Amino acid sequence: MGVIAPEINSTLTGPVVVLAPDDILAVRFPRSPDWDQERITIGVDGRATFLSLDDIQAAGMTLAALDEKLTEEYAKVLAQPELTVQVVEAAPRKVVIMGEVGASGSYELPAGHLSLLEAFGTASGVIRDSAKLGHTMLMRWMPEEGRVRTWKIDARREEWGAEIPIFLQAHDVVFIPAKPVVHVNEWLDRYIRRNIPTPFLFRPN
C-alpha cells in the first residue's frame, strides 16, 4: 500500500468541482438574460435539461468542461453565446464500498480526507474469513481524461501500517472480492456497472 499510495494520491482532483447527481446548477447569459436558468437539477442518470437543448450528460464533468460544452451547443441556436455555469446547491459527495465488508453501500464523504482503511471501518469492517484484501480494487473517475482508472491494491492487514495512506475522493468505488480478480473487464461489468448507484461514470467501452 505504501508503494502504490503516492501514485493513487497524485490523481486526487483537489479543489476541482466534479459535478454529481442532485447538484443544482444555474446558467446565466449576461447578454441574453431571457435565457437564464436559475435551478437545473442533475438527474440520477447524470443528465440535466437545458433550455432549447437536448439533455446533456453533466455528472462527472468539471464546471469548466460543462461551460465549454454548453457554449458549443448554444452556438447552434444563439449568435456568439456568452454564459456562466455555477453550482447553486451541491449534493453530498459519496464513495461506494462493495464486496466482503460488513455493510456494502454508498457512503457520504466526511469533511477532509477519507483513507482507504477508514473506508473499511465506515463499511462495518472487512469480513475476515472471506475477504481477499490482497486483491482490493479501487476505481477512480478522471474527469479531465473522461475515463476511469483502476488499481489493484494489496490491502492485507500486514500492509495497514504503511506510512503513506491511500486517500479516497468523491465517486471512488472500492471493491473487496471473495476470490482473486483475473479479468478486470468482467469484474467491472459483473459488480460495478450493474450494481453501483453511479453507473453514468462506468459506461461500457
Image: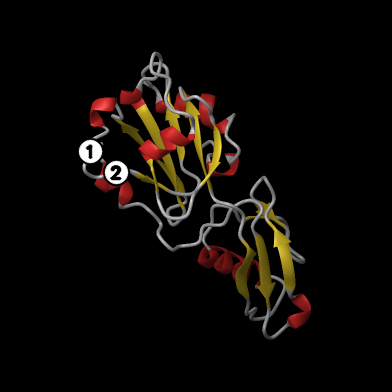
- Rounded to the nearest whole Å, what is the CA distance between mark 2 and mark 1? 7 Å
Q: Amino acid at mark 2?
A: Pro
Instruction: Determine whether, in the image, residue 137 is placed left or right of residue 110.
Output: left
Instruction: Determine whether, in the image, residue 29 is placed left or right of residue 188.
Output: right
* Residue placed furthest toward the bottom: 31
- Mark 2: which secondary structure? loop
| Residue at left offset 59%, top offset 30% | 195
Q: Give whichever of 79, 22 is nearer the camera.
A: 22
Binning the other alpha carbons within 10 Å of mark 1 as few (below 14), some (14 to 19) or many (20 upward) gives few
- Mark 1: which secondary structure? loop
Quadrant location of the N terminus?
top left
What residue would you read off at disc 1?
162
| Residue at left offset 34%, top offset 24% | 133
Instruction: Determine whether, in the image, residue 131 is placed left or right of residue 83.
Output: left
Binning the other alpha carbons within 10 Å of mark 2 as few (below 14), some (14 to 19) or many (20 upward) gives many
Q: Position of residue 46 (x, y in %)?
A: 64, 49
Q: Position of residue 101 (x, y in %)?
A: 47, 25
Please report contact status of discs 2 and 1: CB closer than 8 Å, yes or no.
yes
Q: Position of residue 32 (x, y in %)?
A: 73, 83
Q: Amino acid at mark 1?
A: Ala
Instruction: Determine whether, in the image, residue 77 is placed left or right of residue 95.
Output: right
**Image mark for residue 133:** none
| Residue at left offset 66%, top offset 65% | 25
| Residue at left offset 73%, top offset 58% | 49
Q: Give whichever of 61, 38 is nearer the camera.
A: 38
Work out whether 75 lies above or below 100.
below
What residue would you read off at disc 2?
165
User: Could you tell me if residue 203 is visible in this image?
Assistant: no
